[in-house]
Image (cartoon, rainbow, N blue to C red):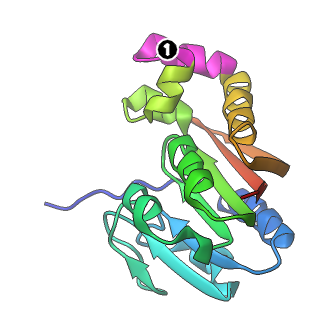
Amino acid sequence: MSTQTHTDNSSLSLKVAVSRWVWDHIPERRVLDLFCGQQGWMYQGIWHEASEYLGVDKFRPHRLATTLKVSAERAVGTFDLSCYTIFDVDTYTTPWVVARRICVRRGPGRFGMALTLGDERGLKNGHSNEITRRMIGASGLSDYRLLVRYRQFIQGLLLRSIGEMPGITLVEAVKGEVVKQSTITYIGLVVDKQV
């Protein structure tokens, strides 16, 4: 029995462009690629240029660079995050729980995050993180329709909630979307964390 690795590269060029934007705003590039996938598309697309790189995936991480078979949640909860200046958070559904954990655990200084949002797909398939469900009270297909209607507003609230965390300042952000069967949103963030 094989384990299916869920990756969405609906628009790899857009995903790389948003990640390049983050790259251009962070001078020292040490990347922690959460949910790096077995093909290593983002490593091949941009992260191979980093001075340091670590990819993690709980299923089958690629073998193009140093990777570990561990969940993103565990990595963010146990690794020394001050070693990294760029975090690629592609959770297949909602990245907000992992992104918030990074903001809490990462030491002071400037860092970037490249987020991939598949909230719509996550709610439709019942695999969304609880933060989205709590924000909008969502639990089923009717809530999926609600999310589709208010997606921009919900994303804005969740993004704003990052900037309202103690000691966190959102310096800049960029966003791109691709609409196919489900909408996939790519967000690049530049964050300053004070002590």
Magenta-span inclusion, residue 148: yes
Residue at 36% across, 60% down? 71
159 displayed left or right of 139: right
Residue 114 picture location, percent across and down: 67, 58
Residue 84 picture location, percent across and down: 62, 74
In front here: 63 or 113? 113
The number of discs equals: 1
Residue type highlighted by circle 1: Gly
Whether residue 56 can be seen here: yes
In front here: 135 or 93? 135
Q: Residue furthest left?
A: 1
Look at the picture and state if 122 lies above or below 30: above
Quadrant of the image occupied by residue 190: bottom right
Look at the picture and state if 124 lies above or below 53: above
Q: Residue furthest top?
A: 142
Residue 193 picture location, percent across and down: 74, 57
Residue at 48% across, 74% down? 55
Other-residue count near label 1 (Cα within 10 Å), few / some / many at <14 / 14–19 / ≥20? few
Residue hosting label 1: 137
Residue at 45% across, 86% down? 66
The boundaries of the magenta stretch are: 136-150
Q: Main secondary structure of the magenta part?
A: helix
162 displayed left or right of 137: right
Residue 68 picture location, percent across and down: 37, 76
